[in-house]
Image (cartoon, grey):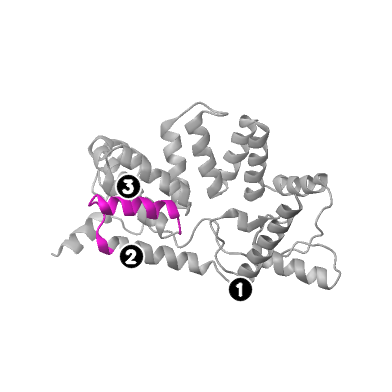
Amino acid sequence: MSEDNIMSNISVCSASCGIAEVDEVKLKECADCDLVRYCSDACQIDHKSQHEEDCKKRVAEIRDELLFRQPESSYLGDCPICCLPLPLDESKSSLYSCCSKVICDGCNHANKMREVEASLQNKCPFCREPIPSTDEGFDNQRMKRVEANDPVALRREGVVHYHKGDYIKEFNYHTRAAELGNVEAHYRLAVLYDEGHGVEKDRGKEIYHLEEAAIGGHPDARFNLGCEEEESGNIEKAVKHWIISANLGDDGSIKELMEKFKEGFVSKDDLAAALRAHQAVVDATKSPHREAAEEYYRIEDNSNTEDC
């Protein structure tokens, strides 16, 4: 019998009592790993002492498989209007409180020019909600989204309380946003657990939230994990983290990889591949509209500087 057939037979038998899975008997997998199945809770309890060590090892392997998988894109995703990847530099995009959409400067600028030329009311480029004229109006829009349990709005509310120095409320809002899958909220929770703001310092929870953010495509979280591994002497894992974040467009990771190349920890081929992937990601965020917006804002900034 082949190894595959043996493993197939094992997979449909209870690991404790050996009963086979048939029409009237349905086996369930171990809740933590994918190695064994059981016919009942009692059967699983009986087998716990024999399975515990293998289970922990497999759980760690599964976590590493997930952690070191290259995300398809950064956590920022695409601009919902032009459908091009958003740049990692968040100063080149805007978050709208009415719909919690992040719009790139290119689309913002094009919309603004259209409104000026046609003497139109200033509206959100995505949902067309009128832009409030007061801070109170922006706050009201944001709180409507918070009340709707919008994870982006919850994360934004956490940032508002961070700037107020209310770290307990920041922690609460970021926790809610993270539970709803917001990647940036996981990163900010890692920072809070690291600094002990609004919560007791907790190294384990800091790393957990960094990993969750990294899995979701957060380059800064991934970069920090690489630094953590380097400090622990795990250079191979550090390099893996930096290659993944470099592939997402992170400049800091490219610098670290170049240093490790000089020290002999990164091959020439791996460095070249990371540089190509990094450049490709950066190029993908460029467009004529975004370049026009950048030039417009540059001229505007220079004009403001001269006036001062």
- Residue at image coords 62%, 67%: 290
Is 267 in the magenta? yes
**Alpha carbon separation for disc pair 1 and 3:** 36 Å
- Left or right of 48: which side holds 142? right
Q: Quadrant of the N terminus?
A: bottom left
Indicate which label's residue lies in the foreground, 2 or 1: 1
Q: Relative to residue 207, is residue 244 depicted above or below?
A: below
Residue marked by disc 1: 288
Q: Is residue 27 visible?
A: no
Percent coordinates x, y for residue 217 in the rendering: 47, 54
- Left or right of 60: which side holds 182? right
Residue marked by disc 3: 238
Where disc 2 sits, the SS reads: helix
- Residue at image coords 57%, 62%: 86
Residue marked by disc 2: 273
Percent coordinates x, y for residue 246 in the rendering: 40, 57
